[in-house]
Image: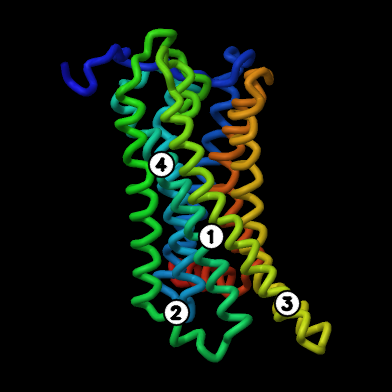
Amino acid sequence: MGLFNVTHPASFLLTGIPGLESSHAWLAGPLCVMYAVALGGNTVILQAVRVEPSLHEPMYYFLSMLSFSDVAMSMATLPTVLRTFCLNARNIAFDACLIQMFLIHSFSMMESGILLAMSFDRYVAICDPLHYAALLTNEVIAGIGIAVAARSFITLFPLLFLFKRLPICRSNVLSHSYCLHPDMMKLACADITINSIYGLFVLVSTFGMDVFLIFLSYVLILHSVMAIASREERLKVLNTCMSHILAVLVFYVPMIGVSTVHRFGKHAPRYVHVLMSNVYLFVPPVLNPLIYSAKTKEIRRAIVRMFRCMKT
């Protein structure tokens, strides 16, 4: 008997928003706007960093990595979300669902790792500015990017095999318009203890550790800033961190919320699960380019110059 000789449905059925099925066509419009903002905004930032020499610094390389992960996350969910809401085409093949699940969780973990790298960048820039150029060279930036991507794919790759060994015989209807590991596990008619333990291990050892290290970096940053005599200088230094702080909150608050609901809110209404998951996936890619464009004047100026050059 083969390792994966178990019962699997040929496909899963995706779900939009429970109770609002008749309004899916109307909801497709706002969703398209959100995808357009996410893809367009992050692409503009990627292009601005690429063409503007003044942005060829570690801080902005990390920002371009964040924009890339947001674009990739949006592209991973775009096909099934728009098919579900625009065409009412709810079927997704079993293997395609596995791949989408893997990509969504991988790019989410990549974003967490990038936010940690950005906090390290801010820590070195504020607490050890004299060694900033020596510590964060282009080679180091490239190495950090490869390490973040490798951590995501290596850590999450076992999930594919852990899920594929489970027989699915209860139902083939998922709770969202995309595939998530906790949602898919609920359909298994076998012991999912190993999957749950590994999922919790991944959550704590990656996202949990990233949150802790980001928090620690800002404790050290705040300690260093408080040693500055001038109040104006303290505010000026802290202002360089505001974009990153907002990006961290936009990413981690919904993620913690959806994790809590999935693990401890099993009796909560379905629309709560759907709402939290949609906020978790759709909001960060939309808000991140808006935050950095509004709060970082170097990015804003580079975007303006880029569009002026396009007109001439």
Per the image, the residue denoted by label 4 is 75
Whether tag 3 and tag 1 are in contact, CB under 8 A, the answer is no
Per the image, the residue denoted by label 2 is 136
Q: Image quadrant of residue 138?
A: bottom left
Disc 2 secondary structure class: loop
Q: Nearer the viewer, residue 71 or 306?
A: 71
Amino acid beneath label 1: Leu
Question: Quarter holding the C terminus?
Answer: bottom left
Per the image, the residue denoted by label 3 is 223
Disc 4 secondary structure class: helix
- Between the C-alphas of marks 3 and 1, the distance is 20 Å
Amino acid beneath label 3: His
N-terminal label among 2 and 4: 4
Q: Residue at x 37, y 42 (%)?
A: 156
Dot 3: within a 10 Å radius of its alpha carbon, few (fewer than 14), some, or many (20 or more) residues?
few
N-terminal label among 1 and 2: 1
Amino acid beneath label 4: Met
Amino acid beneath label 2: Leu
For the image, the number of numbered tags is: 4
Instruction: In the rendered view, tell whether residue 169 sits above or below residue 45.
Output: above
Instruction: In the rendered view, tell whether residue 234 sits above or below residue 242.
Output: below
N-terminal label among 4 and 3: 4
Disc 3 secondary structure class: helix
- In the image, residue 305 lies at what x, y percent? 51, 73
- In the image, residue 45 lies at what x, y percent? 49, 62
Q: Residue at x 62, y 63 (%)?
A: 244
- In the image, residue 304 lies at what x, y percent? 55, 69
Q: Is residue 89 left or right of residue 96?
A: right
Whether tag 1 and tag 4 are in contact, CB under 8 A, the answer is no
